[in-house]
Amino acid sequence: MTDRDAAPFDLAAMRKQYRSEGLLKSDLAATPVEQFARWFKQAATEGGLFEPNAMIVSTADARGRPSSRTVLLKHFDDEGFVFYTNYESRKGRDLAENPYVSLLFPWHGMARQVIVNGVARRTGRDETAAYFRTRPHGSQLGAWASAQSRVVAAREELDAAYAELAARYPEGEQVPVPPHWGGFRVEPETVEFWQGRENRLHDRLRYVAEPGGGWRVERLAP
């Protein structure tokens, strides 16, 4: 990149002043999932955010080499946070070697973040199939057409694979669930709620799972 390319942007000067309203322990729900439900409802209905269920999923392989990507959250409850993917993708291979994962919900428009750290385990095939049936027909075909994370010679290769599948399973015909595709449920060990504050003195409150059950809440320095 040349100096001319960089000239219009002074990155050191790019900053926003965040809100003055804070986050106290007394504001929090009893469990992180209840608190997440509160914030997610606000993000989905009041935040004006594009795809508030989009989250950055960070994994690491057996050698500790990290990778991140944006994935859509498809379900959450007291048992964890669920997303779906190709098990042969990079994240699927990472999680097979190292099940520890981090989820980040970057709700910048509300000066909020939620960070979930925990262990990912595959969902059952019945649960996977039930969700797969809710996907649009084209997305079902796409799960078969794409060998996710693999090198392809050209876009035409993907288009040809999709066209072949579309001919085999036309609209209205049931598409089988790919054996290499399914869900992961992230069982949280910690869940941090981050609220942007003025002067970079942000509020960070983290739920930590207790060995005998239940949660403790601790405040982190920004």
Image: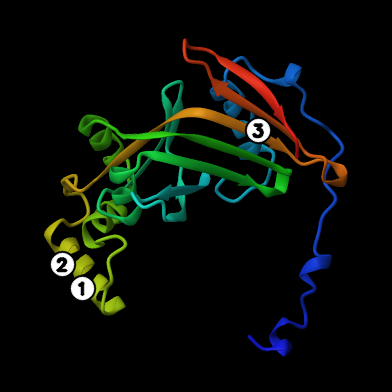
Q: Is residue 198 above or below residue 70?
A: above
Q: Residue 62 location, x and y as percent?
A: 33, 49
Q: Residue 9 location, x and y as percent?
A: 77, 75
Q: Quadrant of residue 99?
A: top left
Q: Is residue 93 above or below residue 4?
A: above
Label whose residue precedes the other's in the sequence (2 or 3):
2
Kindly check if marks 2 and 3 are in contact, taking CB atoms under 8 A apart as contact.
no
Per the image, the residue denoted by label 2 is 164
Per the image, the residue denoted by label 1 is 160
How many marks overall?
Answer: 3
Foreground: disc 1 or disc 3: 3
- In depth, the one of 17 and 174 nearer the eye is 17
Q: Residue at x 28, y 44 (%)?
A: 96
Tell me the SS state at disc 3.
strand
Q: Residue at x 69, y 49 (%)?
A: 108
Is 51 on the left or on the right of 7, as rendered? left
Q: Residue 207 location, x and y as percent?
A: 60, 24
- In depth, the one of 75 and 163 nearer the eye is 75
Give residue 50's mark.
Answer: none
